[in-house]
Image (cartoon, helix red, strand yellow):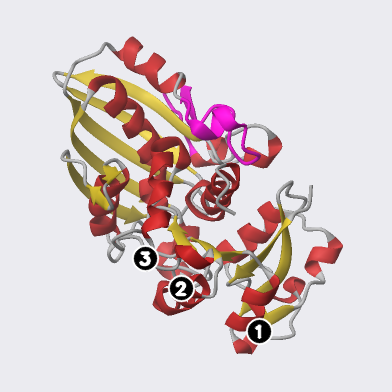
Amino acid sequence: MKKIRVAVLGATGMIGQRFVQMLEDHPYFEIEGLYASERSDGKKLRDVLKVRDHVYKEETLDTKIETMDIDKIAKNARVAFSGIPSDLARKTESDLAEHGLAVFTNAGAHRMDKHVAILIPEVNSDHIKSIKDQSTYGNGGYIVTNANCSSTGIAPPLAAVRDAYGLNFVSVSTYQALSGAGYPGVASLDAVGNVIPFINGEEEKMESELAKMLGTYEKGAFNFAKFRVLANCARVPVIDGHLESLVIKMDSTPTVEELTATLDSFKGEPQSLKLPTAPLQPIIVRTENNRPQPALDVLAGAPDRAKGMAVTVGRIRKSDEYYKLFVLSHNTLRGGAGGSILNAELAKAKGLL
């Protein structure tokens, strides 16, 4: 099978380099080029390496980074994976879509656009049909976003709950890893031995994005879910892995055992399609009192290509009509580059590439 040529935008950043990591030996995609700003032009990936927990191939490390050139990218690639900052993403991604590229982005610039899906394939795979209502779709171009890294982790368990029992109310408190702030992220003297109870814009993103993702797309419009979301977000001195505390209220009241079984058995379209980056079990339930933990569970997921793509749930408890649980996800894999790559795999499986 001839592989689809892809460009990686923002290759000097953490998310860009996670894209490169997950595209090595990918069965569908091959990297056409790595792109960043002018100041990195001509540097090799090894010269700007930020990912510390993956051993790249030597030929990958020797790949030269180029200045972003819309015309060149459009000529040589079918897909652009975008890890560029949101302030640059809006125009750059729109220009790429206008040039006929399928753009799968980690940036938040287009998440709330009228016909742009915030896609998590296990949760709302049908939302991908919204690309056909984008003005650039006629020439093959479109934009698909992945969710904010803190919304990503809790969306699958919330979808499982919604489908089985109905969902009425969600309160979430996040304990977010330093890598979620990008590289170099939070200053060390602010982060070490400390918790920072403010992440600019994060709570607002969670409250709006979850309603869009867990709603519907019909007749050219997103219909937002009606349940209420309240979010508190904090940065903690952990490298990778967002831990989130959930308190939820459902329309019915299953037993803890029933809720556990529902979460444990949850599957989505990526699993039925056997997409390469899809974890065999998207939600993994731990029964130990002290799990999940970033140090132990952040790379949950099988097969090897899906490591870090599963969500881990633990400490499921019932308190009157409320249910309490903890959720952990890898913020730069499931909540970053891996989420966008899974979105592109879904698009290919549906004949949209």
* Contact, mark 2 vs mark 1 (Cβ under 8 Å): no
Compared with 45, 208 (above or below) is above
Give the x, y percent position of residue 81: 57, 63
Q: Is residue 167 left or right of residue 242?
A: left
Q: Which residue is drawn at 58% across and 70% down?
A: 13
Residue drawn 49% across and 47% down?
A: 241
Name the kind of residue labelled 2 in the image: Pro
Give the camera-side residue of 118 and 5. Answer: 5
User: Residue tagged by mark 3?
Assistant: 110
Residue lying farthest to the front in this orientation: 138
Secondary structure beneath label 3: loop
Residue 68 visible = no
Q: Which circle's residue, 3 or 1, is located before the other in the chain?
A: 1
Instruction: Sort mark 3 into few (<14), some (14-19) or many (20+) by Cα contacts within 10 Å.
Output: many
Residue type, label 3: His
Q: Is residue 219 left or right of residue 286?
A: left
Magenta-colored segment: predominant secondary structure = loop
Highlighted range, magenta: 267-293
* Residue 314 position in % (x across, y down): 41, 26
Q: Kindly identify the residue that appears in the image at 40 percent across and 14 percent down.
A: 261
Query: Which of the numbered marks, if any, corresponds to residue 40?
Result: 1
Q: Can you give x and y, in whole percent of width and height, for residue 36 in the image? A: 61, 79
Between the C-alphas of marks 2 and 3, the distance is 12 Å
